[in-house]
Image (spheres, coloured by chain):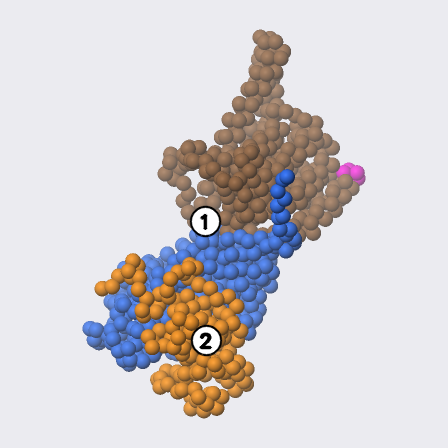
Amino acid sequence: MKEVINLPVKNIEEEEYHINMGPQHPSTHGVLRLVVSLQGEIVKSLKPHCGYIHRGIEKMCEKDTYPQIIHLTDRMDYLSAHINNHAVCLLVENALEVEVPERVKYIRTIIDELNRIASHQLWWCSFGMDMGGLTCYFYGLRDREKILDIFEESFGSRLLHSYYTPGGLMMDIHPDFQKNVKAFIKYFRKKIKDYDDLLTGNMIMQLRTKGVGFLSKEDAISYGVTGPSGRASGFSCDVRKHHPYGVYDKVDFKEILGTKGDTFERYMMRMNEMHESMRIIEQLIDNIPAGDYTAKMKAVLKLPAGEYYQRVEASRGELGVYCISDGNKTPYRMKFRSPNFSNLSALDHISRGVKIADLVAIGGSLDYVIPDIDR
Amino acid sequence: MDKATLKERILGLVPDAEFQENKQFLTFIIPPAKMHDLSLRLKSEVDLQFDYLFCLSGVDMVKFLEVVYHLESTTHKHQLVLKVRTEDRVNGAVDTVCDIWRTAELHEREAYDLMGIRFNNHPDLRRFFLEEGWVGHPLRKDYVDEVNIVEL
Amino acid sequence: MNFSIYDFTSFNQWIDKFLNDNLPAFWAIAVEMVIIGVAILLFYALVGLFLVYAERKVCAFMQNRVGPNRVGPYGFFQTIADFIKLMLKELIYIRNADQLLFNLAPFIVIIASFMAIAAIPFAKGLHAIDFDIGVLYVIAVSSLGVVGILLAGWSSNNKYSLIGAMRSGAQIVSYELSVGLSLVTIIILAGTMQFSAIVEGQANGWFIFKGHIPAFIAFIVFLISSTAETNRGPFDLAEAESELTAGFHTEYSGIKFAFFFLAEYMNMFIVASIAATVFLGGWMPFHVGGWAGFNHIMDFIPPFVWYIGKTFFVIWIMMWFKWTFPRLRIDQLLTLEWKYLLPINLVNILIMAFIVLMGWHF
C-alpha cells in the first residue's frame, strides 16, 4: 500500500513572501541585507542583517594610539571623513585641554562644511538613482568633483583624508584654497538650480515621496534618528547648534527644521542644508586668521584616565565618540555612536505598509552608509 | 536643570545610586534591578524628560561588565550618564530599555554580540554583526582569536 | 523596367515577375518569403544595433558624458563588440528553473516583435505584408510579448523576477487599452485600418494636424501608453533596477539576455514606427499648403528617409523621457491609466467621431 504523506496545510493568505534585499542589491548602497516580508507589493516588516563589512574598528582602536585612530575613523562614514576625524581630534584636545589655534578652527569648520556639501551631493545622486532617475547621478558627481579637487589640491587625497591631527592639521592649506572655495560656491549656487529642475520639481518624484514614509517627532527621538532625517520630523538635534565646536558659535546659520517627517521633507532638509553650508563657508572663508596650523603637541599622546565623550554633527547625523582611557597611549575602550546605526533602527518602523518602491525611496532618504553601521 | 539639582533629583529617585566623578557628564552607577523603573521615570517625569538615548555602550572592565547609557532631554537640554554593572561574565544580564527608548534595540543587540551582555525581555536578542554560532564576544578583553587578531 | 527610391511598387512587381517567369509558382512564393525574411532579419539586427548605440549616445548627452567613443569612429562599433561579447558569454544554467519555459521565454518576446515589424510600411510599396486590418494585427501581435515576460519571470524561480513579471503583466494589460483606443481615434478619422491606406490618407496633411485637438491628444496618449507598453522608463517597473535588481530578466545571461535587450529596443522601434505612420504621415513628406517651392524640396527627400526621420524623432522623445524622469510606483502607474488616460481616451474618441460626422476635419 502506498504510504500516505500528510503535508502541512498552509493558508496561502498567511504565508509570508520573503525577499532578501542585499547584500548585493543596487539600492542598499553597500552590503546591507534587509529581509523583507511582503504581501504582494506591500512591505509587512523588515529585518536588517548587518556585519558584511564589519572590520572591528572599535577593537582595533584598543591597540592603536590616538593619532592612528583618526585614520580608522575615515573608514566609517567615508563620505564625511573629515567630520569623523574632527570628532576624535576634539576628543583628544578636550581631554588634554589643548588650546587649538583659531586658524585651525576656521579651516576645520570650512572643510567640514565642504565635506557636508560633498556628502549631500552624493546622497542626491543616489537618491535620484533610487527613484529611477539615472541622470541625477552624473549631475551630482559633476559638482562633487569640484570639491574633491579642492581637497586634493590642499592635502592630496580625495576620499579618506585624515587631514586633521590632534592639535591641528596635518599641513597648511594650499595658497589657492580660498580662491577655489569661493569659485566653487559661486559655481554651485548656479548649479544647484539644476538639481531642483531635474528632481525636486518633478511631479513623479513629488507624488512618490510626499506623504510616504512618515516618522513622527516622538519616534524620531525615541529611535535616535538624527541629522537631516531627524530634523525632517521636527527633532531639533543639530550638534552644531546645541553643543558648538569649531567656530560654529561664531557664524550665523539656521538649523533647518521640518514638520511633515515624510520622505520629501527628508529630501528637502538636505537640499536646504547645502544652501546653509554654503552660507557658513561664505562667512568664514575671507576671515581665516593667520597663525600656526597646529598647536604644540607632545610626541606621545596619553589621555588622563577617565571617560570622555565627544559629539559632532556628521553629514548623516550625530556622531558620538565615547572613550575610556586608563592613562595609556591607547584607549581602554572606544565606542563610536554612528548616526547611520541609529537611523537604520527606524527603517522597520517607517516602512511598514509601504510598497517596495517606497521602501527604496525611504532608504534613499535616510541615506545610510553601510560601513558606518558596521564599523 | 543644573547638575547639582539633577544630582539631588536622581539620588531622590534611587537612593542607593552611586555617584561617579566625571568632568563632562553627571554619572551614576545604578543597581541593575532598579534600572528599568528608573528609566521609565526618567522619561516620563515632567522635570526630567530624558527622551533621547544618544549612546548605549557595553564596556568590559575585566572585573565586571558595564552598560553605559548616555541620556539627554530634548526639552530641558540636560544630560545624564547611567551605568549598570554585572559581575557574572557568562550569564550576566541587565533589563532591556528598548521598550522605553526604541533605539536601544539595535544598540543592545550590538552590545550582546560584541560584549556578551544579555538583556532581559529584549524582543529579538540575536547576534547583530557576527553570524549565529560564533564563539566568544570579540570586544571582551579576554577574547582570543589567533587567526584574525595579530598581537604585536 | 524602371524603379525609383520614391516608389518601390514597380521594383517589387519586377522581382515577382522575374521569379514567376523562371520558377514554378510555389517556389517563386517560397523564394520571395525567404528574401523578405532575410531582409527583415537584417534590418532588425541593424536597427537593433543602431538603437542601442543611439540610446547610449543620447543618454550620454543627457548626462554630461561622452558615451562610447573607443571602438570605431565615434564608438560606432561599440554595440557590435557588445553583441559579440554577449554571444560568447556563458549561459548560466539555473537549477530549479523550469528549463523549457526558461529557454522559450526570450524567443516568444523576440518573435512577437519580429512579427509586428512585418506589417509596417517603410516606404511606398515597401512593406512585407499589407493587411487590411494592419493596425489590429500590430496591436494583437505586439502584446504577445508580455507572455514571454511573464514566462521569464515565472520560470526563473526568482522572487525578484516574479514580482517584475507580475508588474509587467498588470502594466501591459492596462496600457494595451490606451494604445488601442488612441489608435481607434485615428482610425475613425482615416476610415481604414490598412497601414498603406492610412499613409495615403495623409498625402494632403498629417493626421496629427488634420484631426484638430483630439488627434493631438491621441498622439500624446499614444506616446505615454506605448512607452509604458514597451516597459521603458519612467514606466520600467518590470525591470526597476533599483528595486528589483533587473526584474524579469535577473537570471538571464549571454545571448538570452541579449534577446530581451534587443526585443526591448525593437519594440520601441515598432511603437515609434506606428506613431510615425499613424500620426505623422508615415513616409509622406512634410508639406505646407501654398509653399510650392518648399513642398517640392520636401518631395525630393526619399520617403524612406522621411519614415526613418519621423520614427527616430519619436524614439528620441521616448529616450528623453527615460533619461529625465524618475520611475513611477505601481499604484500610480495603474492610477494614471485607469483614472486618467482611459477616460480621456473615451471622451476623445467621442469628440473625434463627432468631428468626423460633422465633417469639420481638414
Image position of C85 (left or right of A128): left
The chain coloured brown in the image = C
- The disc labelled 1 sits on which kind of residue? Gln
* Disc 1 + disc 2, Cβ < 8 Å: no
- The disc labelled 2 sits on which kind of residue? Val
The answer to whether residue A330 is visible is yes
Q: Nearer the viewer, residue A23 or A108?
A: A23
* Image coordinates for residue A30, horizontal then vertical, percent: 43, 56
* Circle 1 SS class: loop
Task: Write down the chain letter for disc 2.
Answer: B
Task: Check residue B94 in the rendering and tell me which mark sits there, or answer none.
Answer: 2
Residue depicted at 59% across the width and 16% down the height: C30
Q: Residue furthest left?
A: A299
The chain coloured blue in the image = A
Residue depicted at 63% across the width and 44% down the height: A4
Q: Colour of chain B?
A: orange
Q: Main secondary structure of the magenta part?
A: helix
Residue depicted at 53% across the width and 45% down the height: C158
Image position of C135 (left or right of B133): right
Quarter residue B17 falls in: bottom left
* Image coordinates for residue A172, horizontal then vertical, percent: 25, 68
- Residue A98 shown in magenta: no
Which residues make up the magenta segment?
A: C355-359
Q: Nearer the viewer, residue B120 or A93?
A: B120
Task: Check residue C63 in the rendering and tell me which mark sits there, or answer none.
Answer: 1
Residue depicted at 50% across the width and 42% down the height: C251
Image position of A80 (left or right of A212): left
